[in-house]
Image (spheres, helix red, strand yellow):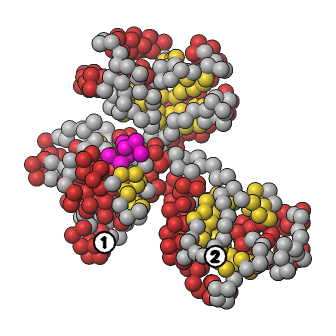
């Protein structure tokens, strides 16, 4: 919900007190893409969803694509890109709750062997900011950023106890406008609109019960089989800032038995979490100066198609996430390299649009959980292969040979993503294919990413045999080949796996610097010398790996991603 500005702030905002137009319209396009049931939209679809002119949509898409927040496929399809998660990550850092509470939530999930969530109020809804899930056949599918109707989950009854009259009115209006909850993609819509007053009456009773008991339950309100128990987390001033929930399935617990099983631990961990919130937060180091406004160079490059105001507004939004508690106006200007007046307009626009707010009585601005509506939950669901795939496609367009990503699987490599090229003679490999690591370029790169002793042990136990006349099978020779890949940062294997097949690979690192995968290009040995392959392929291959790493780092900053 938009937050009203003070009179002084309104005077300092854009003319007429309106938000900066390009920023408002750019956020509208992102919201439309995030809310769309499919993964992609055409520009015409965005025009209909936002009510904007086609020329405006085109300029916004051009700008957001340049920033890496969108990508274009098949010349026209518009998709959210992983880097957009920077915006949600900024909120999660700014609010400080995951950093303070998530370690305890993970410990509680381990102790109870059930899924544990942290959620915050967002208007008349409930939005997840942390998920510690158990791996089961019937597992919790919610992601960070998902929004639930307050009346259909346990935390909602806790938050509604403190709703203002305006929030209550907003909630009733939402019930009237969307009685089947179709505006909440994370939950199944109601099969039919409930009877007038039925939901409101039931929810008021649950709120009263939660207020009296100090906890709330969800007995299959979201969908059959799902039960949950939640307790509130209070800030030092007594306000409810988030809720701690334990979620289970009726195959293991009823709502009552879950409460009996989990409430003592919920209360214990809740007290520890509130103590963590009451501890003075360390003084954040001011962000380093942002340097010159980089949007000027992009404007010069792209001309009128590039929207500087949109870029500057989003840079201010991400800057607020550079430290828990947000930034002052001066801090935002310094972090972004913008003039103070420009940063002020962006801050006040974000406030009017409901994405930022002044922090307490101070001069800082903080981000609000509504930022997570900008595609965070959808992008949180991306698999590693889906992150890598568009970069492989771009690489294939550049080098005109097939490209793949693989991971170690015991003594083999296993392909997890692949893009074929169209040639009369090409390499036919599919996702899931396994080859011995010792005879492949990706295998040697992956072995090179291990500690030397572990790599040597893997090679020693592998069933090494000559696959072609060129296969290196001597133990010392293979250890040296892996060491060479470690020194060079890449591996080139010439016809050792199959005669005529040549491949070159580089590592893919996670945000900690650990090698988690490898990306390669495969070609036919008749197409030039080994040096020709290095010169023609290695620069583009290295750039593709770096692009995968950048996306992987953004996605995994707050989301646990399983890499096969």
Residue 2: x %, y % from top left = 25, 38
Q: What residue do we see at 64% from left, 76% from top?
A: 425
Q: What residue do we see at 89% from left, 70% from top?
A: 465
Do tag 1 and tag 2 residues touch (Cβ < 8 Å)? no
Q: In which quarter of the image is residue 191?
A: top left
Q: Which residue in the structure is indicated by mark 2?
A: 425
Residue 490: x %, y % from top left = 67, 76
For mark 1, give the secondary structure. Answer: helix
Residue mark closest to the camera, 1 vs 2: 2
Residue 300's place in the image compared with 97, above or below, is: below
Q: Which residue in the structure is indicated by mark 1?
A: 298
Residue 5: x %, y % from top left = 19, 41
- Residue 178 disc label: none
Q: In which quarter of the image is residue 160?
A: top left
Task: State left or right for residue 64 relative to residue 377.
Answer: left
For mark 2, give the secondary structure. Answer: loop
Which region of the structure is painted magenta? 32-38
Task: State left or right for residue 208 relative to residue 55.
Answer: right
- Mark 1 → mark 2, Cα distance in angstroms: 41 Å
Q: In the image shown, does 35 or 3 lie closer to the viewer?
A: 35
Residue 338: x %, y % from top left = 27, 64
Q: In the image shown, does 322 or 304 lie closer to the viewer?
A: 304
| Residue 502 highlighted magenta (yes or no) | no
Q: In the image shown, does 17 or 214 lie closer to the viewer?
A: 17
């Amino acid at each position: 919900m938009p937050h009203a500005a003070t009179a002084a702030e309104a005077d300092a905002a854009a003319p007429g007190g309106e938000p900066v137009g390009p920023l408002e319209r750019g956020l509208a396009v992102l919201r439309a893409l995030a809310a769309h049931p499919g993964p992609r939209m055409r520009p015409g679809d965005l025009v209909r969803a936002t009510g904007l002119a086609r020329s405006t949509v085109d300029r916004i898409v051009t700008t957001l694509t340049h920033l890496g927040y969108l990508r274009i496929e098949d010349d026209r399809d518009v998709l959210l890109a992983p880097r957009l998660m920077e915006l949600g990550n900024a909120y999660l850092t700014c609010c400080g709750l995951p950093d303070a509470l998530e370690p305890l939530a993970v410990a509680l999930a381990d102790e109870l062997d059930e899924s544990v969530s942290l959620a915050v109020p967002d208007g008349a809804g409930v939005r997840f900011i942390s998920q510690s899930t158990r791996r089961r056949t019937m597992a919790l599918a919610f992601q960070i950023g998902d929004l639930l109707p307050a009346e259909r989950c346990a935390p909602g009854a806790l938050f509604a106890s403190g709703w203002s009259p305006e929030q209550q009115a907003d909630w009733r209006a939402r019930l009237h406008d969307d009685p089947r909850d179709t505006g909440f993609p994370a939950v199944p819509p109601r099969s039919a609109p409930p009877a007038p007053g039925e939901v409101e009456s039931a929810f008021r009773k649950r709120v009263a019960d939660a207020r009296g008991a100090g906890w709330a339950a969800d007995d299959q309100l979201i969908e059959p089989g799902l039960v949950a128990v939640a307790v509130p987390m209070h800030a030092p001033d007594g306000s409810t800032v988030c809720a701690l929930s334990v979620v289970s399935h009726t195959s293991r617990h009823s709502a009552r038995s879950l409460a009996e099983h989990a409430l003592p631990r919920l209360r214990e961990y809740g007290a520890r979490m509130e103590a963590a919130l009451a501890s003075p937060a360390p003084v954040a180091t001011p962000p380093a100066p942002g340097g010159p406004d980089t949007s000027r160079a992009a404007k010069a490059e792209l001309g009128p198609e590039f929207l500087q105001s949109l870029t500057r507004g989003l840079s201010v939004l991400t800057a607020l996430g550079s430290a828990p508690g947000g930034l002052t106006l001066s801090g935002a200007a310094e972090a972004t390299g913008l003039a103070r007046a420009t940063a002020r307009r962006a801050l006040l626009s974000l406030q009017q649009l409901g994405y930022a707010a002044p922090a307490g009585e101070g001069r800082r601005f903080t981000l609000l959980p509504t930022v997570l509506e900008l595609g965070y939950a959808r992008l949180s669901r991306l698999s590693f292969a889906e992150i890598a795939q568009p970069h492989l496609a771009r690489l294939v367009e550049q080098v005109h040979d097939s490209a793949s990503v693989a991971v170690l699987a015991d003594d083999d490599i296993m392909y997890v993503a692949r893009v074929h090229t169209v040639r009369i003679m090409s390499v036919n490999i599919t996702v899931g294919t396994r080859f011995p690591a010792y005879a492949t370029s990706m295998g040697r790169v992956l072995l090179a990413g291990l500690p030397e002793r572990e790599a040597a042990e893997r090679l020693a136990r592998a069933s090494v045999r000559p696959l072609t006349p060129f296969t290196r099978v001597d133990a010392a020779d293979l250890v040296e080949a892996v060491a060479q890949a470690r020194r060079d940062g890449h591996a080139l294997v010439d016809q050792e796996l199959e005669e005529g097949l040549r491949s070159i690979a580089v590592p893919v690192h996670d945000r900690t610097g650990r090698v988690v995968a490898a990306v390669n290009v495969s070609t036919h040995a008749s197409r030039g010398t080994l040096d020709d392959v290095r010169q023609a392929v290695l620069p583009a291959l290295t750039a593709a790996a770096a692009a995968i790493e950048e996306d992987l780092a953004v996605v995994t900053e707050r989301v646990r991603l399983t890499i096969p």
